[in-house]
Amino acid sequence: MTNIWVTGASSLIGYGILKSIRSTKRPYKLIGSTIHEDSIAPAFTDVCVKAPFSGSEGYLDWVIKVIKDNNVDLVIPSFDEDVSFLIDHRKQIELTGAKLVLNNAELVHLCNDKWEFYQTLKSNNCPYVIPSSLSSDFHELERDFGLPLLLKPRQGFASKGIFKVHDQNTFDLHKKEIGKKLMVQPLIGKDDEEFTTGAFCDGSGGYYAIITFRRRLSKEGYTNIAEVFQSKQIEEAVLNICKILKPIGPTNFQFRMHNGVCQLLEINPRFSASTSMRVAFGYNDAKMSIGYFLEGKIPKQPKIKKGKAIRYVEEFIFYS
């Protein structure tokens, strides 16, 4: 039996990966880890392990112990901190014999700083990059970008910590953090013109499979409503960006349309919160990852069904 460990199993991304693997109906043994005492993780796993915080003292020894205790064949990290940790300690972990679902190391490190990410795309003449600045001169930014401005964390995810600025008084409240913690961008596009694309990338500047949703976000910054959307422009944008950054495996691209042109919001070099939604439309990147990273199988573009997915809150009951 193949043993697969998914970290962050109580998160939307984590149990989305687990649900996607379960949907294959293959007899995998699923191990999930979570920092929470009470979580949904046991509902989707065969073994649920209490985890320390990612990167805390002794974390590497704990990771290796979990792999050995459970004879883990494949490790799938579900969130940014674990992706970065596993990338940095890949050699030690792979000595156990376990395989890791990890993206291009350079891209992972680049995505940890959105300003450096912007600079890299700009220096490669990427036409989909959103203009950005580290200037703290309000009048200069108003002239160049217009209002409202967005103050965006250089590190972060799921639209957390973003401030929308309509006037100088609001700008001045956060001015000191620009450069060190924040960067500045214009507000581009509209909320109903936002798209999330999952691509299984080949590491050489292309991709094997792709799916795009037009989406609406929840207050937490995750996709709440997703509708299958076909766009040659977005597919060309993904290919252009892949040629520059060379991602490998499951990669999430987020776009907005602005004046008819798609603009890149960010890249997540990992699985995304839309993972389990995609399965319903024929795209299972968890299944692709098992085949690719563990069995050496090249993914093929699946036939994508049309439709819409809506997230809602539901209870899972654990009987005593």
Image (spheres, rainbow, N blue to C red):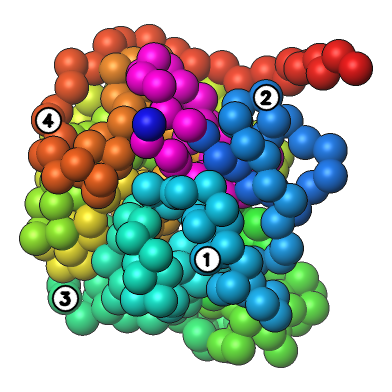
Residue 164 figure quarter = bottom right
Q: Nearer the viewer, mark 4 or mark 2?
A: 2
Residue at horizontal 62 percent and vertical 66 percent from the top: 62
Against 162, residue 289 (above or below) is above
Residue 235 figure quarter = top left
- Name the element at disc 3: loop
Q: Nearer the viewer, mark 3 or mark 2?
A: 2
Left or right of 70? Residue 232 is: left
- Do the residues under discs 4 and 2 have CB atoms within 8 angstroms? no
Residue 162 figure quarter = bottom right
Q: Looking at numbered disc 2 in the image, what kind of residue is underneath it?
A: Ala
The spot of residue 234 in percent (x, y) is: 22, 41
Q: Looking at numbered disc 3 in the image, what kind of residue is underneath it?
A: Asn
**For mark 4, what is the residue?**
300
The N terminus, quarter of image: top left
**For mark 1, what is the residue?**
64
Q: Residues within 10 Å of mark 3 (few under 14, many from 20)?
A: few
Q: State the residue lying farthest toward the right.
A: 320
**For mark 3, what is the residue?**
124
What is the spatial separation of the Cα atoms under label 3 and label 1, in whole angstroms? 39 Å
Q: Nearer the viewer, mark 1 or mark 2?
A: 1
- Name the element at disc 4: loop
Left or right of 221? Residue 84 is: left
Q: Nearer the viewer, mark 4 or mark 3?
A: 4
* Numbered range of the magenta stretch: 2-29
Q: Looking at numbered disc 4 in the image, what kind of residue is underneath it?
A: Lys
Residue sitting nearer the eye, 320 or 223? 320
Q: Nearer the viewer, mark 3 or mark 1?
A: 1
